[in-house]
Amino acid sequence: MNGYWDEMADFTKRLFNAAFKTNPYLERGLMTGITRISKESIFSDLNNLEVVITTSEKYETSFGFTEQEVFGALEEYGLGAEAQMVREWYDGFRLGNRDSIYNPWSIINFLDKRKFKPYWVNTSSNTLVSDLIRKGNRAVQMAMEGLLQGKPFEASMDEENHIQPFGA
């Protein structure tokens, strides 16, 4: 974006090389919460990468909070009566074959502040969503409008992290 791709790619290649490939003090590294980028681009200097995405079963029990964990924390904090609202606000992830996975950032902030808010909103850029709304086809725009109105939306993904076309 904004004409900085070559500079960013060069910096990232050097960073990953120093941090992961040539670092004698690191046996294994983990990067989370990043948009998948082809191994042929900025990851081309790295080898032995294993890409694990949200549909992978390998680490499905390692990320996020289960409903049982969340409801237990609510009880511990004296907020058990809020369980249904917490489910409505923060349940929504699926990892591998596990449903009802809660975003830890949102749950920790709710337990701390005791207010229902979209805590995740300011944790990243909304550029991709903005582009999707502005440039997407009619089906994409209708789906996004439905989400803004609180309607559910489901999409299928293949193991290469490609979203299946809307309505397919």
Image: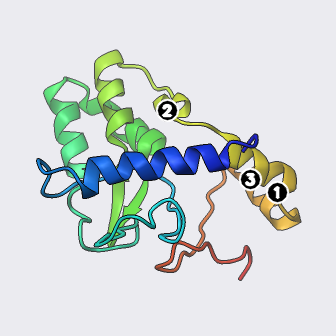
Spatial separation of the CA atoms under disc 3 and disc 1: 5 Å
**Marks 3 and 2, Cα distance to the nearest angstrom?**
20 Å
Q: Is residue 1 above or below residue 167?
A: above
Helix, strand or loop status at disc 1: helix
Residue 125: image quadrant is top right
- Quick one: 32 or 114, which is closer to the camera? 32
Q: Amino acid at mark 3?
A: Met
Asked whether disc 3 touches disc 1, contact meaning CB atoms under 8 Å apart, the reply is: yes
Q: Nearer the viewer, residue 24 or 158?
A: 24
Q: Residue at x 66, y 53 (%)?
A: 151
Closer to the camera in the image, 108 or 123: 123
**Residue 6, position in %: x, y?**
64, 50
Distance CA(mark 2)–CA(mark 1):
24 Å
Looking at the image, tell me whether mark 2 or mark 1 is earlier in sequence order.
2
Q: Residue at x 47, y 48 (%)?
A: 12
Label for residue 144? 3
Of the 4 image quadrants, the one containing the C terminus is: bottom right
The quarter of the picture where residue 70 lies is top left
Q: Residue furthest bottom?
A: 168
Q: Is residue 10 left or right of residue 168?
A: left
Sequence-first tag of 3 and 2: 2
Q: Residue at x 69, y 48 (%)?
A: 129
Residue 63 visible from this viewpoint? no
Q: Position of residue 79 (x, y in %)?
A: 26, 26
Residue visible at 12% across and 57% down in the picture: 27
Badge 2 is on which residue?
Answer: 123
| Residue on which the image places disc 1 | 141
Q: Is residue 15 left or right of residue 147?
A: left
Foreground residue among 7 and 128 = 7
The N terminus, quarter of image: top right
Label 1 neighbour load within 10 Å: few <14, some 14-19, many 20+: some
Q: Quadrant of residue 21?
A: bottom left
